[in-house]
Image (spheres, rainbow, N blue to C red):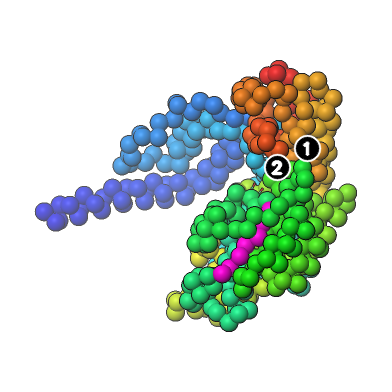
Amino acid sequence: MNRISNRAAVSPTADARHLMFDDLEKLGRILVETGDVAHGFIQGADDMDVTCRDFSAFDPSRPLSGQGSGTLDALRAAKEEILPLLAASIGPRYLGFVTGGTTPAALAGDWLASAIDQNATGPEGSVNAAVEEQVINWLCDMGGLPHDRFDGVLTTGATVSNLLGLVTARQWCGERIGVNIDADGASVLPDLAIFAASPHASMIKDLSITGIGRNSFVKVATLPDSEETDIVDLKAKLDASDARGKIVIASSGTVNATDFDNLNAIADLCAAYGAWLHVDAAFGLFAALDDRRAHFLAGIERADSVTSDGHKWLNVPYDCGIFLTRHVSVLETCCRAFAPYLDTKADGNSYINRGVENSRRFRALPLWMAIKAYGRDGMAGIVRANCDQAADLAAWVRTHEKLELLREPKLNVTMFRALGADDDNRALLDRINATGKVFLTPTVYGGHFGFRAAFSNWRTQDHDLVIIKDAIEMAL
Ligand SMILES: Cc1ncc(COP(=O)(O)O)c(C=O)c1O
């Protein structure tokens, strides 16, 4: 009985490996054909519907098949069954959330990262850690952060970077009063207080993940008609708190109004009250590349930790987040992974000890390629163009008799709505997106339902603005 079932288990596996070796022989052709399919999709993103609204043709319950049919067949199936049902989020008129596209160099770097498949844990036997170190220095330069003081790690996204910010800050708060949360748990600092005016949804999620609790932050007031921290209220709240550990969460580019906090004023308060300053600059960090807006970030070098993203404004593929801190040794205390089998002797940064993951993708490579290919000026060009596009759309909305602007855009997001009831606006958003020419996402601002047009893609051009305005006009 055993012999029969063993034989049955071995032979299909051997067949399947045969398919893989077969594919290895054809790899050149597979890569070329995959390149052709990808190229077709990328070029077609200008003309296809920006989002797919009906993907019922794809059956998620299709049963698992025992035998495969090789990569070229799988590629054909993906081309027929999956690609036509995708969003053109890589294209120029996907304005939902804050969605970066992919520059050609970043795409090439990302493909290469998959092809060479390094496990980017650290410097053992590979230059990947040194590349990550270089990229982090370049990112600091782009964001106006002195790289002799800031160091960090590439993450899966800003949500995880915010998580690292909270965890590192909490450990630092504990160390200041002689307790060790890393070893003994969060209960040794029960009176930790978090102060935030406009925390991003990811930060609230991170409060849950860290066990601090979604509701366990002190809500600081914002300035009138703004998402910016009210410094007077922050001071009053810090003053009233007798918590032994204090963390202030500031924003450099809120997701709706793209407001920037007064970081110098907040850093002064943090210094006075012994608080850690974490700045969420998921996309706003790169406003530093635009000389018309770099002043928004004044004081960011005084932050204890900073969150940003590569997959937003730097237009590298998912996933790529950035976490930077002046206290990398505290980060390493929280994230270190020790076991005899991990105890290697190579010189250099061990990124396994700086983040959530142990095994990790070589996500420094797409960034390295993009920055090498286009330089600081290329990245600045994306930021400037997208800000101009948000301003252009706002100018059009301002003069339109049926539309109203919810806020003057400071950066790359235009928030607007049609005059009238919220329910009518909900229906209008659906009609705008149903045109297939543009994709906007909803928001609530100043008590009103409205739309966000977030320009974050290098491919968006003037003629796209014409198409976007026509689509809105058509839906009105
Ligand atoms: C200000 C801010 N912080 C954090 C995030 C979360 O980023 P991610 O989706 O990369 O985790 C976003 C996403 O839009 C954001 O705008």
Q: Which residue is mark 2?
A: 256
The quarter of the image holding the N terminus is: bottom left
Residue sitting at 60 percent across and 80 percent down? 177
* Residue at the (76%, 54%) spot, across then down: 230
- Secondary structure, magenta segment, majority class: strand
Rendered location of residue 191, percent (x, y): 56, 69
Report the magenta residues as a range: 191-197
Q: Residue furthest right?
A: 292
Q: Position of residue 370 (x, y in %)?
A: 72, 52
Q: Residues within 10 Å of mark 2 (few under 14, many from 20)?
A: many
- Tell me the residue at 49%/45% (across/down): 26
Quarter of the image that includes the C terminus? top right
Residue 343 horizontal/vertical position (percent): 49, 79
- Residue ID at (40%, 31%): 59
Question: Secondary structure under badge 2?
Answer: loop
In the picture provided, is 214 more to the left or to the right than 437?
A: left
Q: Nearer the viewer, residue 21 or 124?
A: 124
Q: Nearer the viewer, residue 317 or 430?
A: 430
Q: Mark 1: which secondary structure? A: strand
- Rate crowding at label 1 as few (under 14), some (14 to 19) or many (20 or more) other CA atoms within 10 Å: some
Q: Which residue position holds label 1?
A: 407
445 over 194 or under it: above or below: above
What's under tag 1, amino acid-wise? Answer: Arg
Kindly identify which numbered label has been placed on residue 197. Answer: none
Q: Hey, what amino acid is under mark 2?
A: Asn
State how far apart marks 1 and 2 are (Cα): 9 Å
